[in-house]
Image (cartoon, grey):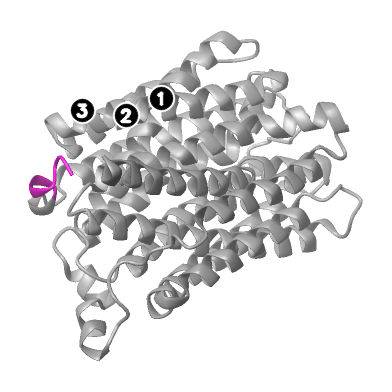
Amino acid sequence: MADTALARGELARGGLMAAALAFGGLPLYVHAPRYYAEEMGLGLGALGAVLLAARALDSVQDPVLGWLADRTRRYREVWALAAAALLAAGFVVLFAPPGWGDAPVRLALGLVAAFTGFSALQIALYDHGLALARAAGGGHTRVALWREAGGLVGICLAAMAPAVLGAVLGPKAGFLGFALLFVVVAAVAAGAMAGRWRASGAIESAAEGAASSFRQALETPGVGAMLAFGFVNALPTAVTSTLFLFFVGGVLQAEPHAGPMLLVFFAAAAAAAPFWARLAARTGRRRTLALGMSLSIAAFAWAYALGPGDVAPFYGVALASGAALGADMTLAPAMLAARIEGGGARVFALWTFLQKSALALAAGVALPLLALGGFEPGAVDAQGRDALSAAYALVPCFLKLAAIAMLAVLPVEKERSLATS
């Protein structure tokens, strides 16, 4: 009984840190583009260029951070604390009131700091989960479920916080209040994890370093293919995350519903995650994930048919697509973890690199193309609305179809042996 309680406590602490990480991460991908386009007056071309450059740098540095994380396992406590502090500092710079500093410079500096802190902390959290599962002799899906469920709770809170704080503090101070609130949340999560951080494997000797090398991890059957699948499967979410607030305001013309719609989306993901995990234990992760991805395609095909005033139907889209996201967030990382044999932090660093590369492409390509298609934030005509609908709804459908095709041919050796782990 004591062991079970201890295991649950460890999982809960990881879930709390995941919640704090997600609480600070959501605005970087969802709120920042629109905040700088509408509140800061930054053009879509310049906005896309800065986002692409910052996210590209963020992506490139992730493998380096993963390599450093594996080399500095004994200092994982210091690593995690420094990462949380850097994320909080970047967040405050990013969401300071509009009149504070030059918009492109502030956006670039804030994103680089926040992304670096976010990446370092996320790598540590994933590796911590891998170490927990190894110590228990399995349980990758259970660890992923607690971690991703905690993250989804943090996302749900972050979805509503800017609107609530904006109403209380005023629109100019709402995001600054959110930034300061994140500092408090990050401090609480860091305190809960103090003395608890783990790293996968022992500190490397020369022989152990060879055994846990990044190259050997990639040569493990299924790892490379799983990473490629993760990149393609992340593209649809990257596109919709970047364009969500623009779609709600420009196509649906329902800006007051943006916060509640985000809440429904992520709450559905959190609620559906245990269902997907249980279903995966019975039918296998591959089949279950394919089912969730198919649900996502149906949801966004429905979104393309919507227009001004279609608020209630879009809540249905948010519910269905959120439930589908629960499968992606819970099962895909578990499938990767089940294939890793050494070099855990570095493999998860590459996973993060590919996920963020997808976000970089979404922001750097979609926003300038939307501007060329006639879309302007705050002044959407019929042409701009059509371009936005196609980018938000149809493009993700085609990308998901490509990801399903890749999923169908993934190697299955490790997945079969750990289907219920």
Residue 207, relative to residue 368: is it above or below? Answer: below
Identify the residue position indicated by label 1 in the image: 271
Q: CA distance from mark 2 to mark 3?
A: 9 Å
Amino acid type, callout 1: Ala
Dot 1 or dot 3: first in sequence order is: 1
Residue 195 in picture, x, y percent from top left? 48, 63
| Numbered disc 1: secondary structure | helix
Question: Residue at the spot x=57%, y=50% of the render?
Answer: 189
Question: What span is in magenta?
Answer: 415-421
CB atoms of marks 2 and 3 within 8 Å: no
Based on the picture, tell me whether residue 40 belongs to the magenta stretch: no
Q: CA distance from mark 2 to mark 1?
A: 7 Å
From where the camera sits, is residue 165 visible?
yes
Which of 41 and 237 lies nearest the eye of the viewer? 237
Amino acid type, callout 3: Leu
Dot 2 or dot 3: first in sequence order is: 2
| Numbered disc 3: secondary structure | helix
Mark seen at residue 274: 2
